[in-house]
Amino acid sequence: MTAEAITAYSNPARAVALPFSGWALLKWITAACIAIVAVFPIWWMVNVVFAEPGTPVSLNPRLYPTSFSAGISKILMIMQETDYMKAYYVSVAYSLLTIAGVLIIGSMAAFEFALFEFPGKRILFATVMLSLMVPTAVTIIPTYLLTASLGWLNTMQGLVVPGLASAFGLFMLIQFMKTIPRDMIEAARLDGASHFQLYRYIALPLSKNALVTLAILTFMKTWGNFMWPLIVAPSPELYTVGQVVGLFNSPYSHQTVDIVMTANLLAALPPLLFFLIFQRKIVEGIAMSGSKG
Amino acid sequence: MMVFPFMLLFAVFFLYPIASGLFYSFHDWNATTSTRFVGLGNYQRILASRDFEKAMWNLGKYIAITVPLGISVAFGLALLVNSFKGFWSNIFRSAFFLPVVLPAFLAATVWRWIYTPNFGLLNMILGWFGMGSINFLNDTGTMLYAAIAVDVWVSAGFNMVIILAGLKNIPKDYYEAARLDGASRLQQVRYITIPMLYPVLFFVTTYGFISALQVFDVPWLLTGSSFASYGGRQGALLFPVMDMMGRGFGSLRFGQAAAYGFILTAIIMLFTAAMFALRRKGYDR
Amino acid sequence: MAQLEITNVSKSYGAVNVLKNINLEISSGEFVVFVGPSGCGKSTLLRMISGLEDIGTGQIRLNGQVVNAVDPARRGVAMVFQSYALYPHMTAFENMAFSLMIAKEKKARIKEKVERAANILRLEHLLQRRPGELSGGQKQRVAIGRAIVREPKVFLFDEPLSNLDTELRVQMRAELIQLHDKLKTTMIYVTHDQVEAMTLADKMVVMHGGVIQQCGRPLDLYDDPANKFVAGFIGSPRMNFMDADVARVESDHITLAVTGALKQFDLPFRGFDSSLRKVQVGIRTEYVGLSEDADSAVSLPATVAFVEELGDVTYMHTDLPNGERLVVRSNGGRYRGGKECVAQLDTTGILLFDEAGERIRSAS
Ligand SMILES: Nc1ncnc2c1ncn2[C@@H]1O[C@H](COP(=O)(O)OP(=O)(O)OP(=O)(O)O)[C@@H](O)[C@H]1O
Ligand SMILES: [Mg+2]
C-alpha cells in the first residue's frame, strides 16, 4: 500500500483518482469470465435437470433453472425406474470400503515406517516409493488377470482389495507421522504403552488431519474411478455410478438429455457436497502432495 | 509387525502383477487357451501396427499442446487468484477448482453434451454469432482439440492449487526488495516468481507429462465408450492406453496388452528421466 | 545405600564411542545433576537409565536388581523431556492420567492420584486445558505432574528448563527444589548450564567426551577440581590459565615463573614431582586484582581488551604479552579508561595442573 502511494506521488499521470485502475478492472473481468467457464457446465447441468422436458433450446437456452418440480420428478423417475439406486449403493460401498481399508492398512504401515527401525525398512520403502513412478497402465491388465484367477470378477472384494495398498496414501501418512516428535513416543513408552497402544492412542489421534485429508482424496478418487470397475465388474449387478452414467451417455443409449443429465447430476452430487464441506482439506491435501512429491 | 498387511497387499497386487505382466508379454495368451511363448513377438506386433502408430501420433500432438497449455493456464489462474485478497481470492479459487472435483467421467459426459451438434450449448453460442453447427466430436479436424479443452478444463484447477501453495511460500521480502529495485509487475513474475517456483513448476510439469501419457477416461468417453467402439472417427482420438485396453478386453489378446503396458512404461520412464536430466542442467546454469 | 549403581557402562553408535566406562553410584533421595558441554553424552546416559536406549556394555542396577533387560515402563522411572512431550490431543488431566489408564487403574483412583499431583504443582484450574492452551511453565508443570502420578523410584529430567525464559527458569528451579524436598525421591537431572547444576545438585557429575570427569558436591568441585576441564567448566567467568616454568623445587614449596610475570614467586607445596619442568597455573578471577602495591603479589603487565561493568563488579579482559587472555576482577571499582595495567595474582588462589590438564595436588 505504501509503495503504491509512493508511485502515485512520483508519477503524476497516475495520480488521477480512479476507483479501479485499468489493471484491476481487467483482472476482475478476466477472473469473472474464467469463473463462468469453470462453473457454467455444472450450472448448465443443473438447469437442464430443473427444466420442463421437451422445451426446445431456442425457447429455453437453459441459462437458469425453470421448473423445480420437473427436476424432482426426473430424479424420482431415475431412482424408481432404473437401477441407478443400486449403482449408487455399489459406488458408496466401494468408496467406503476402500477408504476404510486404505486408512487402516496405510496408517499401520506408516506408523512402522515413520517411527521405527526394522530390518529391510529402507529397501521396502524404496520399492513402495518407486511404485509411485510406475504407471497404472502396466499393472492394470495383469492385476485384472490376477483378480480374475482369484475368482473375484464381479465381486466387491475384486473392486476394493487390489486398490488398498495405496503407495500415495502411505507416503502421505509417513510424511505426516514423521513430524510426531520422538520424545512423545518415548514418553508414551515410559508411560507403559504397548506397541499397539502407541499406534492407537498416540499416532492415530495425532494424524487425524492427515487421515481426514487422505480419506477425502481417496473418496474423490474412488468415486471417480472409471477404468477399474469397467473391467473388473462388468456385470450389471455391480455397476458403479460411473458405469451407469457411461451407459446412459453412450451413443447407443435411448435416454433423452434430461434423464442423462439427471443421472450426471446425481453422480456429481457426493463429490460436490464433499467439496463444499471439506474445501480447505482437499485443497491442502493436494497442495501438500504437490510440494512433497 | 504392522507393516505386514500393507506389504502383503502390495506384493500381491503390485509386485506380482508386474512380474506376471512381464511373463505374459512374451506369450500369446487370450485368457482361456494355454499360453504359447512368442519371444518378442508381441512387442514387434505392436510396434508395427497401424493403431499404435496412430495412437502415438495422436499422443504426441496431444501432449505437445495439453502440457504447456494446461500449465500456463494453471499458472495464470494461480497468479490471478493470488492477486485477490481474502474473500474474493477464496471465491475464485473455489470456482476455478470446481471442475477438478467432478469425476473425469462426468466432466467428459457433460462436455459431450455441450459439444453436441445443432442444439449443444457450444453450437448454440456459435449460432448466436452466425456460425454453422460443427460436429466437434466427429470431425477429425476438431476432435483432438475438443478433447484437449476438456482436459485443460478438468486439470487446470488441480495444478493451480499446487502452484498457489508454492506462491504462498515465496517470502514477501523478495517482492519488496525487487520493488525497491524498481522492478515492474511483469519483471517481478519473471525474475522472482518463476525462479522461486521452479521446483513446483517442475513437479507440475513432470506430473502433467506422466498423466498425459496415460490419458484414457476423457477420450474414451468422448468417443464410443465401449470395447467395441473407441477412439472415434478414423481413430482421431485413439490413445495408447485405449489401444492397450482394446487389445486386452476388446480382442482378448492379453499377451499383447501386457507388452503394450511395458512399452508405455518405458516411454514414461524415459520422459521422466529426461525431465530430471533437464532439471539438473537447469540447476547447473 | 546406593539405589542406582552404574558399573562399567560404555556405549557406542557404530564406531563412535559416546560413553566410556561410566561408573556411578546414586543414593536414595539424592538430587544428582549431570552437567557437561553439548554432545558429551549426558542424555545418552540418562536415556540408558530410563531404558529408552539399550545399554551397550556394563550394568545398571536399580535397588539391587540388574535392569539392563527390563522394559522402560517397568523400571519405576519417570522422565520429563526438554520438549515436554505432552500429548497435544489430550487435556492436562488426560496427559497425567495416561499411564494409569494404560495400567488399567480404576477411574476413581486415577482421579485421586492426578488431583493430588495437580495440587502439589498448583495445576488444579488447568486440568481441562490442552497443551496448546498452556504457557511454557504450565506445560512444564504438567509434564512433571505426569511423572509424579506414576510414583516413580527415580525421576529423570533431560534439560527440562531450557525452553523457558530466564526468569521462569529461576522460578522453576526453586519449585523443583521444593518438590524434591516434598517428595524426597531420587532425581537425576541433565543440563549443560553450570549455574543450574550448582544451584540444584546434591551431587554434581561433570562429564566431557563421554567420560565422567569428576563427581561430588558442587562447592567441592568448585574449590577442588580434579582437572583443568572441571576447573574451567565450573564458575563464571572462567578460571584463568597461564603457563609457568618450575624454577626450583623445595620440600615445602616450589618456585614458579609465570610467563610474562615480572618476577618469580614461591608457592607452598609438598611432594612436588621434581621431574616436571612446566605446569599450568589456574586462578579464578576473584584472586586476580589491580592492586597498586606490587610487592606482596605477582605482577603481570597487561593490555585491556574490553571491560564488562556489572555495577557491583567489573571484569577487565586483558591480554598478556604472549597473547593469552587474563580476566581481572575488581569489586565495586569503576573503569576509568586507560589501556595499560598491571594485574596482580593472589597466589593463595593458585591451582596447578600438569600439561595433560590433570590436577597436581599438594601432599598434606
Ligand atoms: N542415535 C544416535 N546415533 C548416532 N550418534 C548419536 C545418536 N544419539 C546421540 N549420538 C551422539 O552421541 C553423543 C552424545 O549425545 P547426547 O545426546 O548424549 O549428548 P548430550 O550430552 O545430551 O548433548 P546436549 O547437551 O546437546 O543434549 C553426541 O555426539 C551425539 O552426536
Ligand atoms: Mg541432550
Image (cartoon, rainbow, N blue to C red):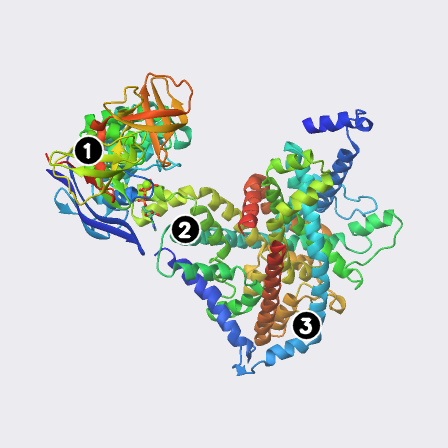
- Mark 1 = which residue? C224
Of the two numbered discs 2 and 1 in the rendering, the one whose residue sits closer to the viewer: 1
- Give the chain of mark 3: B
**Residue C107 in view (yes/no):** no
- Report the label total: 3
Q: Nearer the viewer, mark 1 or mark 3?
A: 1
Q: Does dot 1 land on a helix, a strand or a loop?
A: loop
Asked if the residue under mark 3 is in contact with the one under mark 1, i.e. CB atoms within 8 Å, the reply is: no
Say which mark, if any, is on residue B52. 3
Which picture quadrant has residue C281?
top left
Q: Report crowding for label 2: few under 14, some 14 to 19, many 20 or more residues within 10 A (C-alpha).
A: some
Visible residue check, residue C316: yes
Neighbours of disc 3 within 10 Å: few (<14), some (14-19), many (20+): some
- Check chain identity for marks 1 and 3: say if they share one: no
**Image quarter hosting the C terminus of chain B:** bottom right
Q: Residues within 10 Å of mark 1 (few under 14, many from 20)?
A: some
What residue type is disc 1 on?
Answer: Asp
- As rendered, which of C297 and A156 lies closer to the eye? C297
Residue lying at 59% horizontally and 43% vertically, measured from the top left: B165
Most distant residue in the right direction: B130
Q: Tags 2 and 1 in contact by the CB under 8 Å rule?
A: no
Residue closest to the eye, A287 or C110: A287
Residue A114's tag is 2
Query: Hey, which quadrant is residue B151 in on the image?
Result: bottom right
B143 or B127: which is nearer to us?
B143
Secondary structure found at label 3? helix
- Give the distance between the C-alpha atoms of the residues marked 2 and 1, in whole angstroms: 49 Å
Q: Is residue C242 left or right of residue A7?
A: left
Type of amino acid at the residue the image marks with label 2? Ala
Q: Give, as a three-letter code, the residue at label 3.
A: Phe
**Residue A108 placement (x, y as % from top left):** 40, 52
Residue A139, horizontal then vertical, whole percent:
54, 66
